[in-house]
Image (cartoon, coloured by chain):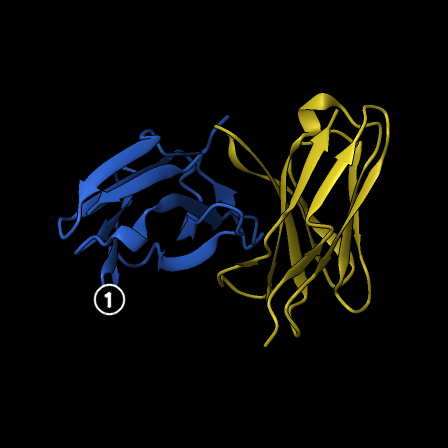
Chain colours: A yellow, B blue
């Protein structure tokens, strides 16, 4: 079974631009969660989608948004990029109907200049 | 407000000895806990989990202990191997089945050969 894939793996943007990151979950998984990892902050929860609906949301500003498609693939968008948005963005998929482990993708490294 | 805390940012252990990684949480509604291991340039990999109805779960060299009254969990690795050198994250979930996972800031384990 193929794992979680994320594209692109690396991205460089400038302040004020916007960016879209993509995540393809493991086949059969309906839940996709997004996390931001920065040094010293661990993994900060952004949001979780389940069957195309945002089911959970973390404490991030509205510049961070996401969506999930009918095939469970998910995208995350960050508008008006700030220097502090530079981070590793991780996507995780799971069955989402009971307490199971999540399976993580390799992440997208975003650098904002 | 950091609901899941890993107060030791790093830990060094001699090969063959026991590694003990600690995690504290503040939200008494958490009822499911997980440990993940992360190597550089890779996404976190699930290691072991424990439900709040248990106080111990074992899987090979890895054992997780849960002390609900102290809101504390620990991961024991015995014996430690150089390949265990990685960043370890604990995560918690619960609160009415929201399937939202809150991660700690991580502990970097270095196993010395």
Task: Say above or below: B80 vs B9.
Answer: below
Outermost residue to the bottom: A1
Residue A2 in the image: x percent, y percent?
A: 61, 72
Left or right: where A49 falls relative to B98: right
User: Could one spot residue B33 in this view of the protein?
Assistant: no
Chain bearing mark 1: B
User: Could one spot residue B112 in this view of the protein?
Assistant: yes
Q: Quadrant of residue B14?
A: top left
Task: Say above or below: B113 vs A73.
Answer: above
Left or right: where A58 falls relative to B95: right
Q: Which residue is rendered at x = 44% and y = 46% of the image? A: B91
Q: How many marks?
A: 1
Q: Nearer the viewer, residue B81 or A45?
A: B81
Q: Which residue is rendered at x = 49% and y = 52% of the image? A: B44
Left or right: where A67 falls relative to B32: right
Q: Quadrant of residue B88?
A: top left
Residue A76 in the image: x percent, y percent?
A: 77, 46
Q: Secondary structure at mark 1?
A: loop
Residue B84 in the image: x percent, y percent?
A: 30, 52
Mark 1, residues whose alpha carbon is within 10 Å: few (<14), some, or many (≥20)? few
Q: Nearer the viewer, residue A111 or B29?
A: A111
Q: Which residue is rendered at x = 67% and y = 23% of the image? A: A84
Q: Quadrant of residue A78?
A: top right
Residue A61 in the image: x percent, y percent?
A: 74, 29
Q: Nearer the viewer, residue A95 or B82?
A: B82
Q: Which residue is the site of mark 1?
A: B60
Task: Say above or below: A35 vs A99.
Answer: above
Outermost residue to the left: B17
Left or right: where B1 falls relative to A110: left
């Amino acid at each position: 079974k193929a794992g979680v894939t994320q594209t692109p793996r690396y991205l460089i943007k400038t302040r004020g631009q916007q960016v879209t990151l993509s995540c393809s979950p493991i086949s059969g998984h309906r839940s996709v969660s997004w996390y931001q990892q920065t040094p010293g902050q661990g993994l900060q929860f952004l949001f979780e989608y389940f069957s195309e609906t945002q089911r959970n949301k973390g404490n991030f500003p509205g510049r961070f948004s996401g969506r999930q498609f009918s095939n469970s693939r998910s995208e995350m968008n960050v508008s008006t990029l700030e220097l502090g948005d530079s981070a590793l963005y991780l996507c995780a998929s799971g069955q989402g109907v009971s307490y199971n482990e999540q399976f993580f993708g390799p992440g997208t490294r975003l650098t904002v200049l | 407000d950091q609901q899941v805390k890993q107060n030791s940012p790093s830990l060094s252990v001699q090969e063959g000895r026991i590694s003990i990684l600690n995690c504290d949480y503040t939200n008494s509604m958490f009822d499911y806990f997980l440990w993940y291991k992360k190597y550089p340039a890779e996404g976190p990999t699930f290691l072991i989990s424990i439900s709040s109805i248990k106080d111990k779960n074992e899987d090979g060299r890895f054992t997780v202990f849960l002390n609900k009254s102290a809101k504390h969990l620990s991961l024991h690795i015995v014996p430690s191997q150089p390949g265990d050198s990685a960043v370890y994250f604990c995560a918690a979930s619960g609160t009415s089945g929201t399937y939202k996972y809150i991660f700690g800031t991580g502990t970097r384990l270095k196993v010395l050969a």
